[in-house]
Image (cartoon, grey):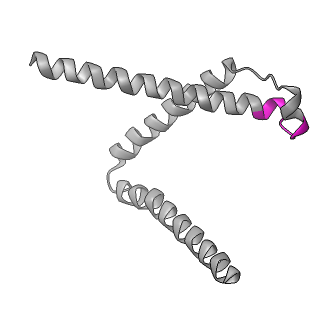
Amino acid sequence: MESFIDIALWVAMGMVAVAALAAILMPVINSLSHPKTLVKSGVGIIVLVVIFLICWSIAGDEVSKRFVEDGLTSSTSKFSGGLLMTMYTLFVVAIIGIVFSEINKALK
């Protein structure tokens, strides 16, 4: 029974990988016929990278003794802090966008 579960897990992970690859590649293939959409996507990715780099640069790299024993390094801590700050930033921007669009819709 254990070997069946192991095989099923590997098959499921493979299917998720194929689906993720298809979800990434199919829009890229479709957008090759419309280069303007590809440029817009590229600008969006660049903006996300810039936001991450800003958040990563201001993130701290402190590691407590408890986590040093588990193998956490200062660079891993800084990377995790940058990812968390990026998520918080994008969350706040999304909330502001929702509120702004609702107010704008109510005024029209």
Task: Tell me the quadrant of the picture where the C terminus can be found.
Answer: top left
Q: What's the residue at 40%, 46% (across, down)?
A: 38
| Nearer to us in this view, 106 or 57 | 106
Q: What's the residue at 86%, 31% (across, down)?
A: 66
Q: Picture coordinates of residue 27 (x, y %)?
A: 39, 56
Q: Picture coordinates of residue 94 (x, y %)?
A: 38, 27
**Quarter location, residue 29:** bottom left
Q: Picture coordinates of residue 65 (x, y %)?
A: 89, 28
Q: Picture coordinates of residue 26 (x, y %)?
A: 41, 61
Q: What's the residue at 56%, 28% (across, down)?
A: 86
In the rendered structure, the answer to whether residue 43 lies left or right of residue 86 reads left
In the rendered structure, the answer to whether residue 56 lies left or right of residue 108 reads right
Q: What stretch is highlighted in magenta?
A: 69-76
Q: What's the residue at 69%, 21% (across, down)?
A: 59
Give the residue furthest to the front. Answer: 1
**Quarter location, residue 39:** top left
Above or below: residue 7 compared with residue 18:
below
Specify whether residue 73 is painted magenta: yes
Report the number of discs: 0
Task: Tell me the quadrant of the picture where the N terminus can be found.
Answer: bottom right
Specify whether residue 71 is painted magenta: yes
| Nearer to us in this view, 58 or 3 | 3
In the rendered structure, the answer to whether residue 99 lies left or right of residue 13 reads left
Above or below: residue 68 compared with residue 26:
above
In the rendered structure, the answer to whether residue 92 lies left or right of residue 7 reads left
